[in-house]
Image: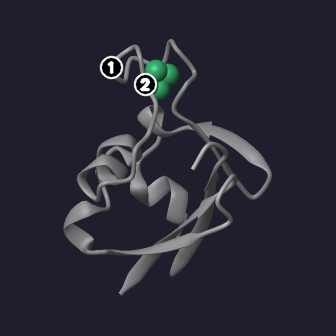
Amino acid sequence: MKQLIIRGGASKKEIILPVSPLFMRDNLLNFLRDHEIPVASSCGGDGICQKCVCVIKEEKILTCMTSVSEVLNGEDSATLTISYL
Ligand code: FES
């Protein structure tokens, strides 16, 4: 099964989340929140506040504007870092 590895920038801890095919089209922000990963937001996912940012392969992305499948990009796993976790 595919997986997302969530790395906390502050805590240095990692959480591995399995990704079922049913969730591939989900918005990353909602996917993370559904798995009890706290992601900051004050715009409700409209792409305005920039608080939901995470880093994947040294590139900053907005979790509210990115799908789970975009993050995995055909790979079996992807690691993303959330600085304040
Ligand atoms: S939640 Fe505000 S930019 Fe993503």
Residue 79 marker: none
Q: Nearer the viewer, residue 19 or 12?
A: 12
Ligand 1 within 8 Å of disc 1? The answer is: yes
Q: What residue is drawn where x is 42% and y is 33%?
A: 64
Amino acid carrying mark 1 in the image: Gly
Residue bearing the label numbered 1: 44
Q: Position of residue 34 (x, y in %)?
A: 24, 52
Vertical side of 39 occupied by 32: above or below: below
Q: Nearer the viewer, residue 68 or 36?
A: 36
Q: Residues within 10 Å of mark 2 (few under 14, many from 20)?
A: some
Mark 1 touches mark 2? (CB < 8 Å): yes
Vertical side of 16 occupied by 42: above or below: above
Q: Nearer the viewer, residue 76 or 3?
A: 3
Q: Residue furthest bottom?
A: 1
Amino acid carrying mark 2 in the image: Ser
Q: What residue is drawn where x is 46% and y is 31%?
A: 40
Where residue 77 sits, quadrant-wise, is bottom right
Residue bearing the label numbered 2: 41
| Quadrant (top left/top right/bottom left/bottom right) for the N terminus | bottom left
Q: Position of residue 15 (x, y in %)?
A: 48, 72
Q: Position of residue 83 (x, y in %)?
A: 67, 45
Ligand 1 within 8 Å of disc 2? The answer is: yes
Q: Residues within 10 Å of mark 1 (few under 14, many from 20)?
A: few
* Colouring method of the image: one colour
Could you say whether the residue bearing mark 1 is in a helix, strand or loop?
loop
Q: Position of residue 38 (x, y in %)?
A: 40, 44
